[in-house]
Amino acid sequence: MSGDKISRPKARLPRGFRDRGAAEIAAERACLDTIRKVYESYGFEPLETPAFEYTDALGKFLPDLDRPNEGVFSLQDDDSQWMSLRYDLTAPLARYVAENFQNLPKPFRRYQVGPVWRNEKPGPGRYREFTQFDADTVGSASPSADAELLMMTCDVLDALGLERDDYVIKVNSRKLLDGLLESAKIEAPKRGTVLRAIDKFDRLGERGVKQLLGEGRKDDSGDFTVGAGLLPWQIDVLMDVITTPPQSASAEGLELAWAKSDSSMSLLTTAADAVGELGKIFQILHHQNYSDRVQLDLGTIRGLEYYTGPVFEAQLTFPVTNDAGDTVVFGSVAGGGRYDDLVARFTGQQVPATGISIGVSRLLSALKSRSRPALSPLVVVLSLDDPQSSFRMAAELRAAEIRAETYVGNKKFGDQLKYADKRGAAVAVIEGGDERAKGEVTLKDLALGAEMSKAVENRADWIKDRVAQVSVPRAELVEKVRAMLHVKGG
């Protein structure tokens, strides 16, 4: 009916998701290219898996199992099968390996980049969709495979422009943690909750972790998380070990960790195995000159429950500021470890595996206050009276690997200059009838003439003031634009 009010959707984002602009996308692309080159230099090859997996294939490994849908976004397809958006890139890899095991080289080395989704409570810097870049070695039980991933992660962070004192990679072992839980007499049903609580140490501190190990904790929003319900003496046993200061990745550091362990834990096979494996990893790192960036940290946990051996996290050591300008504890930008039982969920056969995942979204967020890669400079070719000529010039520039576009909107000269300025273009190319008659084009430096560009209303004003511009032969268009961009640092 004509009198009915039209119902329109409200333009809004779902909570925990965000839009991203050109500058961030360009920075991410440059970051991904850098990581990809390092991964490929180590012999890893790409693999892509779909965003959706059958829910039972993902397993129940998320840190927040008390969240709706067990921490994942799920739906039923048309044959009533439950599917979920992947929460990481490791569980889909395990499914792929199980499906294709007979045809894969052993070990199988792959990298993968893509978005992942978690149905968890969002917060500052914590989104429900983010990008990860993984590398995994499947089919090797050797500590050499773990050591290689640690070295490669150091090389990635170096290649991204970080100095050696800008980051540290902290290493621990789930076997050592299992021994600690056993010595504290913590029952199996509680162990996942305990590990997830300890994993939040960097964010919540000692007091917050103690609350989660005990009766529970209320966060700043008023939400209450039920704790593990440990006894005070059990909490003390755990805190005494996980608060041990990080040690160098060396035999001496391992000896300190062993001495810090409870005597009953020292007799456990799992703890002894952990020390042996870590010792071999640290020996490789030492001889390959990487041990200065790796530490043994008994508080490093990793929240996902599928880890079975060495675990590691890369953390930034410099102050990170949020959008409000406050210094924040940023936490890890990469993490991973050994997961020897994940493929066995499908095949019943244990397949050793280890991997590293770089949180690209988090890493870029931390680095945004530093110099960050951007899109190459843009050239806008104005379209005055001959659009065919404007398109030809833009095509010539692109053929020379110069980013260029032809203006396709309003024909008013002033509007075109304002558009180029708003786009952040470095140079505008102008060819009107006068220039064409002389066999020339005019190049305008938009950075130098930015304020003028905002005020110009017509071509006559622009000609009279002649701000930051030069006329060049049409045949020298590409050469002169390239020279202008070079002077501007492009």
Image (cartoon, rainbow, N blue to C red):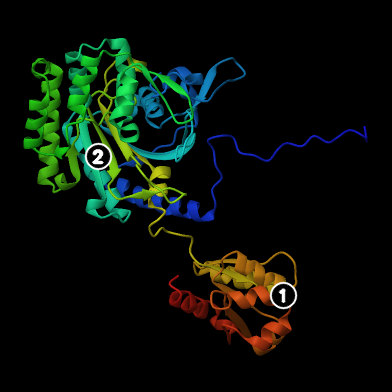
Most foreground residue, 74 or 474:
74
Residue located at (72% from left, 64% from top): 409
Residue flagged by tag 2: what amino acid is it? Leu
> Which quadrant of the view contains residue 10?
top right
- For label 1, the crowd category at 10 Å Cα-Cα, with few meaning under 14, some 14 to 19 and many 20 or more, is some
Please give the residue where the numbered disc 2 appears in the rendered image.
Answer: 149
Residue 302 makes an appearance in the image: no
Q: Number of marks in the image?
A: 2
Residue located at (31% from left, 47% from top): 40
> Which quadrant of the view contains residue 489?
bottom left
Residue located at (17% from left, 30% from top): 142
289 relative to 229 in the view: left or right: left
Residue 41 in percent (x, y) is at 28, 49
Q: Specify which label sits upstream in the sequence, 1 or 2.
A: 2
Residue located at (54% from left, 74% from top): 447
Residue 263 makes an appearance in the image: yes
Is residue 197 shown above or below 114?
Answer: above
Please give the residue where the numbered disc 1 appears in the rendered image.
Answer: 413
Is residue 358 shown above or below 306?
Answer: below
Quarter of the figure that contains the N terminus: top right
What kind of element bears circle 1? helix
